[in-house]
Amino acid sequence: MTIELSELRDAAQKAFPADGLRPARDASWKLIAEMGWLMMPLSEEAGGLGLGRDAVATIHFEMGRVLSRAPLIPALLALQALEKGAGLADQAGWLERVASGEYVAVSLEPKNTIVASGEVLTGTLRAVADADMAGHLLVCAPGLVALVPSNGAGVTVTERPLWDESRRLFDVTFDGHKVAPELIVARDNAADGIAASLRAELLVALAADALGAANATLDMTVEYLKTRKQFDRPIAMFQALKHRCADLKTRIVSAEALLWARAGDPEASEVQLGALKALACEVFRFTAEEAIQLHGGIGLTEEHHCHLYMKRAELNRWLGGSADDLNEAAGRAALAA
Amino acid sequence: MTDQTTLDALRTEVRIWLAANAPKGWRQAEQTHEQFAAAQRDWFLKLVEGGYAIPHWPAEWPGGGRSLAEQKIIYEELAKADTPRLLLSFVSTFHAASTLMECASEEQRARYLPGILKGETWCQGFSEPGAGSDLAALKCRAVRETRADGDVYVVSGQKIWSTMAQYADKCLLLVRTNSDGVKQAGITFLLMDMKAKGVTVRPIQQIQGDEEFCEIFLDDVEVSVADRVGEENKGWAVAQATLSSERGLTLMELSYRMRGALSYVAELIRRHGREADTEVLRQFGVLSARVDSACAIADQFLENRMNGIEGLGDASIVKLTYSRVLREYALLGLKIGGLDEQYRAPITFGDLNTGNWMADYMNSYAWTIAGGSDEVQRNIIAERMLDMPREPKNWVVA
């Protein structure tokens, strides 16, 4: 990790300390804006920090560690889409507003049924993050990327309560909504290019989120095993439990090595990032599963934190594309190599 | 650290040299273990001549004095060119060399190091039937006696799992010179001639048909006191230097070779007409990512070492990752290959990812057991990285 990245990480850990799990969304959002993280990937010419994917991943990693409720992942996706949307009227104004805290919501599920017929949208967008705090949504349909007011004509926003209470997702249904010309971000190939780059960034962001959270899950579990005494000794002394923790540590650290290698490689393909995301989310899922078992009965209680990680882990697996789809694509690519 | 221009130039230089000198068709040519050993000797001497055999040695040696970044490039290129791995000379150039350089006397260095570059090979006489993971429990006994031409240690006992000992000229030997007190405090480190009277080597037939390891029987073998490294009863510390001689390059090389060998999985999928089988494709995708993560963690370990950072347990993570992925690689081949893989096929000596899936599967155990088993690595990770408490030591039979 470079000095720049480790400074970023340290700043994030200071702003969001490990003991403040699931910090409140609105206060976090304010702090995130103050930290300048909303302008990280925006180029310096456009008034941003011009930081790369590895810097962004560093922050998502830390937000995963504290199970952040703030929609930083979709916010940065929207920002990146808007920066690429050269056709957008008042692009500079949009970039400035979004980089300073106006939230534009994005779907975290690339598979959707949205169809654009000309500028008219129909279909349902699933897994739109925190649509309740967004004035506008960014919609990717085949051949069209556009902004839509969340209270626009023919737009219905419905919250879908989740098991994972660290995130809020909404279904957005379009019933023939006509996009205003000044809100069109891109069309045709340019639009599909933006959609592809958002899918790629989402995959890295989710991988980072998952591994940050997996680290926190294991830290918490190891601490518990050191404190919990049975048979007159800390249960961390039992080799049966040690070996399981060591396996988790090994899986996490090696998946993390791949995360930083890919995040630092601008040439990494969407397929490679997908395989990384699938791996990272499986590591987190397994860590969370083991965490509950290793905690015993207390891990099943609402008051303990185990389930918070487990629920986020289960949700993360399905955002950005399922492991089956991503792994299949990776297998196809390896076969063609 | 070496600057990028120098590194790029080295890479080009190595590539050109390999294009002219890398052995071709070596897998087919090595039908017996003897042919394998002979080919290993030739390739090592050629690499010495080219200046790429001992990049990790100090600069006064021809081909030595390479930075870790340069060593990494040489190993990457050797892996990419699919050259035979240097197995026969491995203990000599790493374990023997670092023991001699770090712990031996000037006179011992002068006596033994030049021979290594001429192809003299060494083996390791550490493990015993009763001392595996608990190496310090070793019992091979050495008694000091006086002879007309100087004192000797008279050694009796048995060593096991000595890699390529059947071809070795010399042996790094751990013996017990004192049985009182702490077991680590009675161990002495000797340099033994494998042709000495009383040394018997018996290769061990492995499950896949290779004979990579040997037993060594020692029956009143005399080793001159001049061939003791360090002081009497202080050999345990010397052994630590021996065992920590190789830090990461091998696992990086092996991980890269496994990545190259993913092509065997692709071939297998095609041969069995499973290109459209989504479940097979998914598993291949998972394996590719796992292999990539093994490469990434090996790279990260070396990168950290270049920056002078190495945490307790880091090496264990790299080894445990590699050994698990190596097993997964073989298991996927066996699964796709089905019954076909149960028919015997010739093995390739000294290669871990060959596309002979039963052989690869059986070979993968070498990495989960040898050099500190997966279970020992897990203990290290749990106790030193995660700071989980050790088990009480004073276990007594009830």
Image: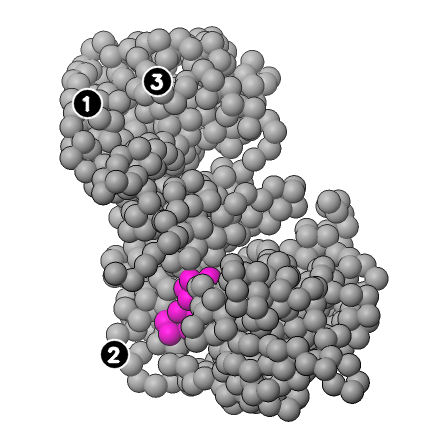
Residue B246, visible in the rendered structure: no
Quadrant housing residue B266: bottom left
Residue tagged by mark 2? B339
Residue at horizontal 28%, vertical 11%?
Answer: A133
Q: Is residue B311 above or below residue B156?
A: above
Picture coordinates of residue B286 (x, y %)? 34, 53
For residue B132, say whether it is visible: yes
Up/down of A148 relative to B2, above or below: above
Amino acid type, mark 1: Glu
Residue assigned mark 3: A20
Please tell me if label 1 and label 2 are on a single chain. no
* Visual colour scheme: one colour
Q: Which mark is residue A303?
A: 1
Q: Amino acid at mark 3?
A: Gly
Residue A294, horizontal then vertical, whole percent:
24, 41
Q: What residue do we see at 35% from left, 24% from top?
A: A66
Q: Quadrant of residue B131?
A: bottom left
Q: How far across and how far down the image is residue A146, in percent?
A: 34, 20
| Callout 3: chain | A
Give me the chain letter of mark 2.
Answer: B
Q: Which residue does the image show at 79% across and 75% down from the upper left?
A: B111
Number of the front mark, 3 or 2 = 3
State the CA–CA distance, disc 3 to disc 1.
15 Å
Total marks in image: 3
Asked if A94 appears above or below B340 in the picture, the reply is above
